[in-house]
Image: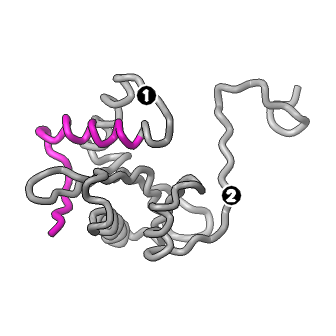
Amino acid sequence: MVDIRRFGPDDRGRWEELFRAYISFYERRLDDAAYDRAWREITSGTRLHGRGAWRDGQLVGITHFLVHPSSSEPDLCYLEDLFTDQAVRGRGVATALIGAVRDWAREKGCGSVYWQTHEGNAVARRLYDEVATCEGYVVYTLPVGDASVDGGNVGAR
């Protein structure tokens, strides 16, 4: 049995362990201030939202998500982060978290929930292929602090 709910003040330590593991999985690094900011945003529930998954009283999975407008359909819910403790993978925790986000998004009037993962994340992609449709979009990222992009397109002088 998986219990999905919002985070409480006492969940900060375990949430951070799981979120740090998620960040590490994608070979990224954040400073402590970023974890503090994320926790504040997630627990305030205004712009960024979060849910945790508990099994046998232990926090074993986390998800973070947000809503944004769309020019062509109802608001969209972006499932930004999803991570489960390795010890419980394959036991329905991620599926329960995705379902909870979908239910939340439905209540808020969103048209759909979407997310992205690295193409090499085969374990997660097996689950995602079961619960959602991959529409084939390619994601590009342009850091806004990088003024070196020119090429006649972006930031041309």
Residue drawn at (16%, 41%) of the image: 11
Q: Quarter of the image containing the C terminus?
A: top right
Q: From what the image shows, is residue 43 above or below residue 130? A: above
Q: Nearer the viewer, residue 2 or 78?
A: 2
Q: Is residue 142 left or right of residue 45?
A: right
What is the span of residues highlighted in magenta in the rendered image? 1-22
Image coordinates of residue 155 in percent, x first then y, are 80, 31
Q: Nearer the viewer, residue 136 or 73?
A: 136
Mark 1 neighbour class, 10 Å CA radius: few under 14, some 14 to 19, many 20 or more: few
Q: Is residue 92 left or right of residue 72?
A: left
Q: How many marks?
A: 2
| Tag 1 secondary structure | loop
Tell whether label 1 touches label 2 (CB within 8 Å).
no
Q: Which residue is mark 2?
A: 138
| Colour scheme | one colour
Q: State the separation of the CA atoms marked 2 and 1.
A: 25 Å
Residue 30's disc is 1
Residue drawn at (49%, 41%) of the image: 26
Residue drawn at (33%, 40%) of the image: 19
Q: Nearer the viewer, residue 123 or 150?
A: 123
Instruction: Tell me the kind of residue under disc 1.
Output: Leu
Image coordinates of residue 86 in percent, x first then y, are 31, 52
- Mark 2 or 1, nearer chain start: 1
Image coordinates of residue 112 in percent, x first then y, are 47, 70
Q: Quadrant of residue 156?
A: top right
Residue 53: within the magenta?
no
Residue lying at the far front of the rendered structure: 87
Q: Quarter of the image containing the N terminus?
A: bottom left
Per the picture, the main secondary structure of the magenta-coloured stretch is helix
Mark 2 neighbour class, 10 Å CA radius: few under 14, some 14 to 19, many 20 or more: few
Image coordinates of residue 54 in percent, x first then y, are 17, 57
Instruction: Tell me the kind of residue under disc 2.
Output: Val
